[in-house]
Amino acid sequence: MSGLNIYQSNPLNIDLKNPRISEPIVISDNTIQKIKFNVMNGKDVEEILFVKEYRIWDNAIEAIFNRDYYTEMAASPDHLIFLSALVNLQKMVYLYMHYYLGLEYSDSTEEKIKIWPTDLNLNMPKMIFDKEDVKHRMDIKSIKYVGDSKFYIIANTHVNEIVKINGKALAIIL
């Protein structure tokens, strides 16, 4: 990959412990994330997230979204499915790494980065029933260049201060 040396050196000189921007960079790409699965044969569960915007700071990213929930399961309340939060989290890491590496992001271009979660810890003490303006925030703890166009990321996230997903991921520059 040509130009990799600029990625190794954190071209924007972002200091995760001392962020320099107080107003976020806003990305509005009208993302629709859809997940559909079944636990019982023929009884589908589906959730669609309509992401309004992503907000990026030097050490964090946040998504604001509305959600629709459909189910054929009995007695299943309309709630955020943790799998939807995991899908959204992957997009958040993808967008944040564009910012961190100084790469231009467009929803209409080819993939530039591959994200591979390597270690996740999920805590969901209660369900999230909110349908509008749900907030998913990721606070970046560290990013380390590990060679061969790869970065190791450690972050903590929460959805509406209730569901917590902490973990590690590998970002690979394509």
Image (cartoon, helix red, strand yellow):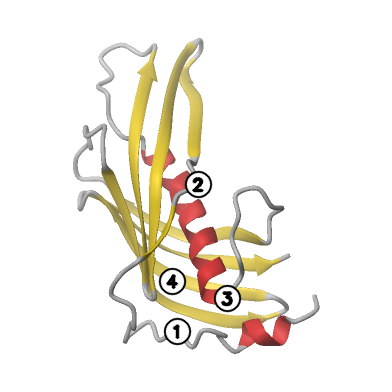
Report which residue position mark 1 lands on: 14
Q: Is residue 1 left or right of residue 29?
A: right
Question: CA gap, disc 4 to disc 2?
Answer: 25 Å
Report which residue position mark 2 lands on: 29
Q: Earlier in the sequence, mark 3 or mark 1?
A: 1
- The residue lying at 43 percent from left, 30 percent from top is 48
Q: Quadrant of residue 111?
A: bottom right
Measured as percent of width and height from the top left, residue 133 is found at 26, 41
Q: Earlier in the sequence, mark 2 or mark 1?
A: 1
Report which residue position mark 3 lands on: 101
Pointer 3 with pointer 1, Cβ within 8 A: no
Measured as percent of width and height from the top left, residue 91 is found at 51, 52
- The residue lying at 60 percent from left, 49 percent from top is 107
Q: Earlier in the sequence, mark 4 or mark 3?
A: 3
Residue 154 badge: 4
Looking at the picture, which amino acid does disc 3 mark?
A: Leu
Say which of 120 and 64 sits in front.
64
Measured as percent of width and height from the top left, residue 97 is found at 54, 68
